[in-house]
Image: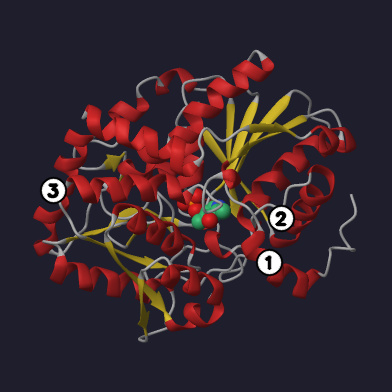
Amino acid sequence: MNHKNFENHSKNFPTKDGYFGEYGGAFLPPELIPVFKEITEAYQELSNNADFINELRTIRKNFQGRPTPIHHCRRLSKKLGKLQIYLKREDLNHTGAHKINHCMGEGLLAKYMGKTKIIAETGAGQHGVALATAAAYFGLECDIYMGEVDIAKQHPNVVRMKMLGAQVIPVSHGLKTLKEAVDSAFEAYLKEYKTAIYCIGSVVGPHPFPMMVRDFQSVIGTEARMQFMEITGGLPDKICACVGGGSNAMGLFSAFLADPTEIIGIEPGGTGSNPGEHAASLTHGTSGLLHGFKSLLLQDDKNEPMPVHSIASGLDYPSVGPEHAFLKDSGRVNYEIVDDEEAMEAFFALCRYEGIIPAIESSHAVAYAMRCARAGEFGNILVNLSGRGDKDIDYIYEKYGTGAKFTI
Ligand SMILES: *Cc1c(COP(=O)(O)O)cnc(C)c1O
C-alpha cells in the first residue's frame, strides 16, 4: 500500500487549475470562465475566514445534528463471521443523508458572496431537497431544474422541495431526465450568474466544485477517524462507501488516505455488466468529458454518455468525480462492484439485525462489508451509511414485499 505518498494529498490536489492528475479541470463556455474564477477565489478566501468556519461549525452542530455517531453492528457481525462491522451514521443528519453537508456549505458560500439565489438540477430529488433546505435556512431563492420523467417518478421529493419554498422547474426536452436537467440549469445560470450561484450535487462538475464539495464532506472522515480511535483504540483495517458521483465516499476517504487503512469504493453493478445494465464508471469507463470536467465515463463510440442503471437512483450517473479516477489509477483506493440483488440483501439484513433502515445507495457499501465477513476476514471495517431508507420503502415494498426471499 502506498499510503505514505498521500500525506499532503488534499493540499496538493487539485492543482490550481483543478486537476487530479489527468482528470478534472473546468471545460466551460467562455462567459462562465470568469464566473467560476470568482467562485474559486471566494472559496479560497472563505475557507480561511474564521467567521465562515465558525458559522459552518455552528450549523453542523445545531441544525444538522453533528457529530453523527458510529454504530457497532454487533448482531450482524456475529451472524456473519469474525469481521466487526461499524457504521458511520450519516443517515442521522437532518434531511436523512450526507448531501446536507455540502448543501449547507454551498448555501453559506452563496450568502457570503452576496448572492440571492441558488440554482441546481436534481435527478431523484435528493440533492434538490437538501439544497431547498439550505435555501430556506439562509433565506435564498432556490430554482431546481428537474426532468419531467423524474418529476412524475419522484412525487414526494417534488412536494418536499415546494413545501420548503423552492421552485421546481420542469425540463421537457430530450429524455427529460438528469442530463437534460443539468443542461437547463446551466443555461439558466448563464443568464443569472450575477445574482445566483450554481450548486452542484456531488464531487463532480467543473473546478472548483469537486474540491469544494470534497472539503465540505470531509467532516465525515475527520469525525469518523477520531470516533473510531476512541471506540476501538486504533484505526479501521478497512473503510468503504458507495460511489455515485462520489461525495460521501470522498468525505470519508479523505481523512484516511495517509493511513495504512485499506480503502474501497463500491460501484453500482445493477443487473449485469453489459452497457445499460450498470453504472460502474470507474470499473467499466474510459477517459472522457461530461458536464464540464474530465473523468472516467461510460460512453459510446460517439463519446455520448451511455444509459446507466442502478436500483439506487442516487448512484446512476455515467461518470464519477475526477478525484476517484485519480485515486483508482494511483492504486490507493480499490473499487469493487455490488449489484442490485446483493444491495437488497444487505438492506434487509440491516433492517432485521440492527434496527436501521438504510438507503439503497448505502446498502451497496453494507453489502461489501457482509461479503468480506462471509469470506472469513477478521479485524474491522467502517462503512459509510450515507443515508436513511425511508425514501425507498414504498418502491421496495412493491418489488420485494418485506423481503421474505432474503434470509441470511
Ligand atoms: C445521492 C446519494 C448518494 C450518491 O452520491 P455520492 O455523491 O456518490 O455520495 C449516496 N447515498 C445517498 C443516501 C444519496 O442520497
User: Badge 2 local density, few (<14 within 10 Å), some, or many (20+)?
Assistant: many
Labels 3 & 2 near each other (Cβ < 8 A): no
In this rendering, position of residue 361 left or right of residue 83 = left
User: Badge 3 local density, few (<14 within 10 Å), some, or many (20+)?
Assistant: few
Query: Residue sitting at 65 percent across and 60 percent down?
Result: 390
Above or below 263: residue 122: below
The residue nearer to you, when weighing 151 against 83, is: 151
Mark 1 falls on what kind of element? loop
Mark 3 falls on what kind of element? helix
User: Badge 1 local density, few (<14 within 10 Å), some, or many (20+)?
Assistant: some
Mark 3 or mark 2: whose residue is earlier in sequence: 3
* Residue type marked 1: Thr
* Residue type marked 2: Ala
Query: Residue sitting at 81 percent across and 49 percent down?
Result: 349
In this rendering, position of residue 375 left or right of residue 2 = right
Mark 1 or mark 2: whose residue is earlier in sequence: 1
Mark 1 or mark 3: whose residue is earlier in sequence: 3
Mark 2 falls on what kind of element? helix
Q: Position of residue 138 (x, y in %)?
A: 30, 52
Query: Residue tagged by mark 1?
Result: 271
In this rendering, position of residue 390 left or right of residue 378 = left
Tell me if the residue at label 1 has its CB under 8 Å from ligand 1: no
Per the rendering, the mark at residue 37 is 3
Mark yes or no: residue 343 visible: yes
Res. 140 image quadrant: bottom left
* Residue type marked 3: Lys
Q: Position of residue 282 (x, y in %)?
A: 50, 51
Labels 1 & 3 near each other (Cβ < 8 A): no
Per the rendering, the mark at residue 343 is 2
